[in-house]
Image (spheres, grey):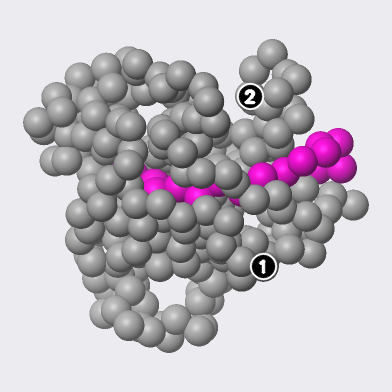
Amino acid sequence: MKYVRYQADGKVSYGVLEGNTVKQMAGSPFKRGRLTGKTHRLSEVKLLAPCEPTKILAIGLNYSSHLHGREAPKEPMVFYKTPTSIIGPGDTIIRPKGTAKLDAEAELVVVIKDRCRNVSKADAMKHVFGYTCGNDVSARDWQRDDRNWWRAKSSDTFSPAGPHIETELDPSNIRVVGKINGKEVQGESTRYLIFDVPTLVEWCSKFVTLEPGDMIYTGTPGEPGEMKDGDTCDIEIQGIGTLRNPIKLER
């Protein structure tokens, strides 16, 4: 099933997407929201980021192709991205004037189903609601030079996600693609994740309580592409769809 969060008639709602029809929900899919009977054409609504996480955990160096000679981590390398960095499909990624290099990172994003802590790997998938496309936008010079990654990874607009949450998906072998202006710059299957989805849920939940709607960005493959003023970035994931965002230089 495909779940969306959208704006229509001045109201923000969750809904179920079937073809080009959005079926409005009362409440949240994380809290047993129900269908209201009201529908919209997809063309009539503005899709938003598909949920509102209390936190975003992101995984670094989780594909061998992204190591570039570095040693593979022995444990998942986790960092935070702020909820205020989230934008939805079609929203503009702002390239700050102060950064010399802004890269896109195509990533499969895990959306957590319920409140959980100390989840075992065997039970991890019971706590996954679904999956969406994500872009771990990264200011490379800030990432290299700062003491930590707070602005390099979490500046406003640096966490695009969407276009919807897909609940019926096996994340173990799907292709993740990143494109800049229609040209593929990244592409690899999740079968090559160093730490797979169950491992990531188990690891993260050892240390923090995961809440409904929380996101785990699972890492990016290969060599990401740079995003410049006027570019368009597409994140395409097999079985989900395409997250598309324009890029503009901060004025």
Above or below: residue 92 compared with residue 151: below
Q: Image check: 93 left or right of 83?
A: right
Which residue is painted at 40% across and 60% down in the image? Answer: 237
User: What percent of the width, then of the height, locates residue 245?
Assistant: 62, 62
User: Circle 2 sits in a helix, a strand or a loop, which is it?
Assistant: loop
User: Circle 1 sits in a helix, a strand or a loop, which is it?
Assistant: loop
Above or below: residue 2 compared with residue 44: above
Identified by mark 2, the residue type is Trp
Identified by mark 1, the residue type is Asn
Which numbered marker is on residue 16? none
Which residue is painted at 59% across and 46% down in the image? Answer: 224
Which residue is painted at 30% across and 56% down in the image? Answer: 174
Q: Does the magenta stretch include residue 111?
A: yes
**Location of residue 213 by image quarter:** top left
Write down the region rendered in magenta. Answer: 96-114
The residue indicated by pointer 1 is: 181
Q: Does the magenta stretch include residue 1?
A: no
Density class for disc 2 (Cα within 10 Å; few <14, some 14-19, many ≥20) is some
User: What percent of the width, then of the height, locates residue 58?
Assistant: 46, 33
User: What percent of the width, then of the height, locates residue 63?
Assistant: 41, 36
Q: Image check: 110 left or right of 45?
A: left
User: What percent of the width, then of the height, locates residue 223?
Assistant: 57, 44
The residue indicated by pointer 2 is: 149
Cα distance between the residues tagged 1 and 2? 27 Å
